[in-house]
């Protein structure tokens, strides 16, 4: 548990001004760039102490939403409050309550980790002793203590991201905004960042909004997820409920292993009236989302009729990717691919290709 010695004033005000337990209230928030609607009248509430996810592909409007909520961009229409403070009218109060980790964070490579944090801490006017103590605690929390006197320029991407996160915590924010916090990180560093955010949330009650196009981030980190596409929220619920929403009696998700898989067979499956989507996972495996009581039989019949040899067949539980596909008609990675670093992208392409 981190000591609350900096923001006590703010906390008191928040308690007074919050009408209910919503820390963040967003109503019809809209951002236009000339004629282009980047964020299209979105509304949602985030409860105090909740981890809330904005999940969507490139260009969905996630970062623009965070930029408006963190007062870095002005809404075109609509409004939002954080801790009861309006993001436009009470920008100063809002900024005292928040910390933000975005993709465009600057660290000074020639300064050590500690010197960087001292520099940014001084921008918040934190008293020197309190700042030093806080920096030491934050280094401990992310296990960077032994690197504190090392130049940031020598740090790995994962270490730099940890620095970005603890920098956003210097002012003891009540609300933490994380824009794609695991982008470009290896699996181990991603796990560490996710675990750190969850610990912060659990032990310090920090409310978190995290944007991501990674299903695993949304699934493992978030209490509730808003699925965003083309600037709109197209679904909002817990991960479990989102999955349940498409796993009703009417939806069947099948994993097929077909020894002689070919475009002809895939075409035949796609042609079934009951089939909503087909994803080729590798040279032998297909994932088929279908609906209706006859779905199972129709898919098998279409494979056989086109000369396919079924080695195995499995009835799967839906994933968030299936939910996204079901609701939007396309996969998150269709557009998010551009953004994935090349190394990860090659791995992704081997394992999944959208074919319809
Ligand atoms: N300053 C700007 N001027 C013009 N268009 C912009 C500006 N900022 C964002 N956009 C456009 O608004 C849309 C939403 O962008 P935004 O960065 O919010 O998406 P995102 O969901 O964060 O995507 P990404 O996964 O790429 O980070 C995009 O089409 C983008 O090109
Ligand atoms: Mg973004």
Image (cartoon, grey):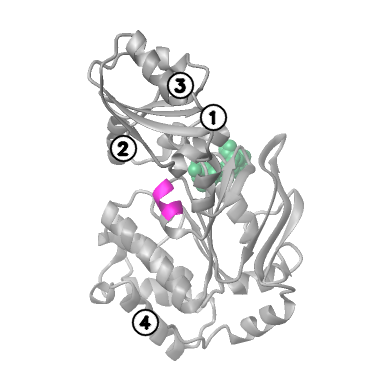
- Which of discs 2 and 1 lies nearer the camera? The answer is 1
Q: What's the distance in space between the residues labelled 4 and 2, CA to CA?
A: 35 Å
The numbered dot on residue 356 is 3
Write down the residue under mark 4. 137
Whether disc 1's CB lies below 8 Å from ligand 1 is answered: no
Q: Residue at x 42, y 67 (%)?
A: 198
Whether disc 4's CB lies below 8 Å from ligand 2 is answered: no
Q: Residue at x 28, y 67 (%)?
A: 151
Write down the residue under mark 2. 342
Number of residues whose C-alpha sits closer than 10 Å to that of mark 2, classed few (under 14), some (14–19) or many (20 or more): few
Residue 168 can be seen, yes or no? yes
Mark 2 or 1 closer to N-term?
1
Q: Is residue 16 magenta?
A: no
- Which of discs 3 and 2 lies nearer the camera? The answer is 3
Q: What's the distance in space between the residues labelled 3 and 4, CA to CA?
A: 50 Å
Mark 3 or 4 closer to N-term?
4
Q: Nearer the viewer, residue 284 or 311?
A: 311
Q: Residue at x 44, y 41 (%)?
A: 318
Number of residues whose C-alpha sits closer than 10 Å to that of mark 3, classed few (under 14), some (14–19) or many (20 or more): some
Mark 4 or 1 closer to N-term?
4
- Which of discs 4 and 1 lies nearer the camera? The answer is 1
Read off the magenta span. Answer: 215-219
Q: What's the distance in space between the residues labelled 3 and 1, CA to CA?
A: 9 Å
Q: Main SS type for the magenta part?
A: helix
Number of residues whose C-alpha sits closer than 10 Å to that of mark 4, classed few (under 14), some (14–19) or many (20 or more): some
- Asked if residue 40 is positioned above or below residue 162 in the image, the reply reads above
* Residue 81 in the image, given as x and y percentages of width and height: 71, 65
* Residue 210 in the image, given as x and y percentages of width and height: 50, 57
Write down the residue under mark 1. 329
Q: Which SS class for mark 4?
A: helix
């Amino acid at each position: 548990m981190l000591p609350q010695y900096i923001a006590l004033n703010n906390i008191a005000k928040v308690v007074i001004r919050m009408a209910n337990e919503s820390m963040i209230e967003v109503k019809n928030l809209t951002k236009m760039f000339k004629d282009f609607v980047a964020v299209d009248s979105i509304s949602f509430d985030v409860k105090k102490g909740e981890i809330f996810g904005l999940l969507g592909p490139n260009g969905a409007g996630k970062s623009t939403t965070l930029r408006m909520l963190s007062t870095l961009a002005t809404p075109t229409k609509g409004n939002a409050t954080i801790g009861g403070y309006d993001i436009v009218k009470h920008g100063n109060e809002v900024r005292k309550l928040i910390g933000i980790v975005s993709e465009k964070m600057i660290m000074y490579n020639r300064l050590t980790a500690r010197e960087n944090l001292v520099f940014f801490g001084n921008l918040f006017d934190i008293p020197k002793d309190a700042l030093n103590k806080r920096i030491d605690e934050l280094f401990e929390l992310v296990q960077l203590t032994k690197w504190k006197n090392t130049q940031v320029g020598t740090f790995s991407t994962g270490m730099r991201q940890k620095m970005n996160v603890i920098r956003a915590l210097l002012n003891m924010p009540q609300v933490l905004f994380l824009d794609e916090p695991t982008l470009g990180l290896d699996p181990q560093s991603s796990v560490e960042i996710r675990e750190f955010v969850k610990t912060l949330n659990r032990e310090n009650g920090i409310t978190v909004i995290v944007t991501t196009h990674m299903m695993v981030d949304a699934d493992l980190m978030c209490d509730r997820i808003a699925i965003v596409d083309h600037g709109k929220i197209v679904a909002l619920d817990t991960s479990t409920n989102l999955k349940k929403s498409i796993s009703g009696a009417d939806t069947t998700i099948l994993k097929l292993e077909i020894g002689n898989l070919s475009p002809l067979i895939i075409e035949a499956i796609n042609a079934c009236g009951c089939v909503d989507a087909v994803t080729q996972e590798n040279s032998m495996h297909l994932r088929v989302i279908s609906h209706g009581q006859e779905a199972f039989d129709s898919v098998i019949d279409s494979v056989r009729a086109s000369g396919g040899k079924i080695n195995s067949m499995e009835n799967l539980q839906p994933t968030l990717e299936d939910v996204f596909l079901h609701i939007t008609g396309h996969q998150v990675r269709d557009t998010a691919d551009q953004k994935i670093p090349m190394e990860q992208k090659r791995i992704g392409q081997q394992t999944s290709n959208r074919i319809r």
